[in-house]
Amino acid sequence: MSNTITKKGDSTKSRLVFAYVVLCFLTVLCLIWFVLLFMSTTQSGSELNVRFQLKIGSSFMTNLKNSINSQNILRGMLNSVIISGSCALLSTYFSTLTAYAIHAYDFRFKGAIFTFILAVMMIPSQVTVLGFVDLLDKLHLTENYTGLIVPSIAAPVTFYYIKQYMESALPLSLVEAARIDGSGEIRTFNSIVLPLMKPAIAVQAIFAFVGQWNNFFVPSQVIIERRDLKTVALLIADLRSMDFKNFDLGQVNMTIFLSIFPTVLIYLILSKHIVGGLALGSVKG
Amino acid sequence: MAQNSSTTSPKKKGAVSYNKWGYIFLIPFFVTYIIFNLVPLFSTIYYSFFKYYREGLNWIGPEFIGFDNYVKLFSDSRIFDYGINTLIMWVIGFVPQILVSLLLASWFSDTRFKLKGARFFKTVIYLPNLIMAAAFAMLFYSLFNAKGAITQLVQSWGWVDSNFDFFKPVWSARILVGLMNFLMWFGNTTILLMAGIMGIDVSLYEAAEVDGANSKQRFWQITMPLLKPIFVYVFVTSLIGGIQMFDVPAILTQYKGTPFAGGKFTTMTLIMYLRQTLTSRDYGTSGALSVILFFITAVLSLLVYRVMYSKKSREA
């Protein structure tokens, strides 16, 4: 009997060791690229042209200055912040409003409307981009942020997550109570429903922000000529078309670093909520 | 839907006057959706039936030609070549992804398996998902190009010859794309599978243990069968994502889809093909290709919806 117990303990232990080895390997596989990237940002272009070295050099500030001056990366970051920030605000506010309409009211075709939103959730934006760009062309909205910001009012995926959360977090008795106290429907939504939904809104706002920051295909079809309007993702794509042999590699690496640094920072600060919030509502049961 | 019956039915009269607000609150979503999604969808479908493209500075058409754009697309081997490229690179990323994710999810969700630092590992493996794919691809290009850091390292260790270039052989170019897809998505899949495993009734495991089932049997006899709906969900959503593959191969190969081997571009994906028709202003071909991709994703979405829906009705 005691023999089987120790045997069981041993096998758990060896499984645990195996798990740690695999997890450490995956950790290295996930992070090595960023370590190499960081090392490259600290070495000058002329050093890198000779040979990349596994060390931290002293050219970080020089590369930063060059990248800011010749790539105008700060303007790109500002553009990305404007678009992503607006999208995060619009998509979360109006998705909550849409979810509230379906959650709190009873009306004809409600089931059909909900089914419709779920059905269109998976349609990729790429397959309608031809008509989308054609529409913006006709409205004289190319080389303009309107077409990148306003559509986020209708965000089926954000809606779906917020609706899931709302089912558990918004008791309708609260809405009834507000009505009895004489609160109008719009005021009830803004001052009672929105604050209650804060945890879900925060997580979805981060996802909307990061998603838009990283968005590449659609913006590349809308902002083509105006360099001063380009987002970070578009500047990165421009970087690829440059001739690497005559180009300052330290600066290239710095631009890549600056384009991923903000999202990594946001993620590391809020990772607890993000990783937890992901499972929430995604697949229930 | 169910919750309303309890709150509104006792005093239906009062509820009626409020319910118009349901429609009012839906207006922003639907107006935006119709303008920026439905109108473009219909004009895309519309253009797919027209001869309409730019030649130099002149626009040819629009002239109605029925299904000619579709016939032209399918009589050309490119759509099949690029579809197969997309599928191959998706499989290279997906197979290790589902295996690794299943392993990690079973470890993370097993409470008796006292894994320390689980939160750290979860944070790390999810990180690549939030990195801009375009920047990540640019980073891979800068590390793996003929003069890149990793190319130099593996050359100096003597693993490859001194003139080796990762972007020249077909296999290494495709594996790089697959590797990046794997890195960006296995954390996400792990979390989905974990949520699925945690949703399984613990008493099933306890009962199995009383009956003398070991951990391997518990995994294969309980976890795997009950995870089937989530596997279908992960598989199909990943496939839908795979069809949209663009940023990584586009940036790595500068939209070219190189290496060119056997008369075809071997890393060119369907969306890269779509971009090509868009930038050359061939609206007819572009429309037809979009409609085909739309139908493929619509059928796959329907599958996901059915899996999710049938699960819900079973719970109720």
Image (cartoon, grey):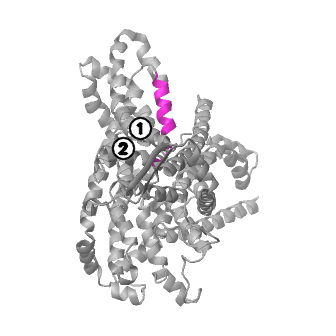
The image shows residue B189 at horizontal and vertical percentages of 55, 54
Residue A116 falls within the magenta-colored stretch: yes
Same chain under badges 1 and 2? The reply is no
Q: Nearer the viewer, residue A78 or B208?
A: A78
Q: Nearer the viewer, residue B30 or B194?
A: B30
Mark 1 sits on what residue?
Answer: B39
Please determine whether, in this image, residue B25 is positioned above or below residue A11. Answer: above
- Crowding at dot 1, Cα within 10 Å, few <14 / some 14-19 / many 20+, comes out as some
Task: Find the magenta span and give its range.
Answer: A109-125
Q: Is residue A198 visible?
A: no
Mark 2 sits on what residue?
Answer: A135
Residue B3 falls within the magenta-colored stretch: no
- Are the residues flagged by discs 1 and 2 in contact, CB closer than 8 Å? yes
Residue type beneath disc 2: Leu
Left or right: A113 with respect to A234?
A: right
Mark 2 chain: A
Mark 1 chain: B
Task: Label 1: state its secondary structure.
Answer: helix
The image shows residue A102 at horizontal and vertical percentages of 41, 27
Q: Can residue B316 be seen in this view?
A: yes
Left or right: A250 with respect to B219?
A: left
- Predominant SS along the magenta part: helix
Task: Label 2: state its secondary structure.
Answer: helix
The quadrant of the rendering that contains the C terminus of chain B is top right
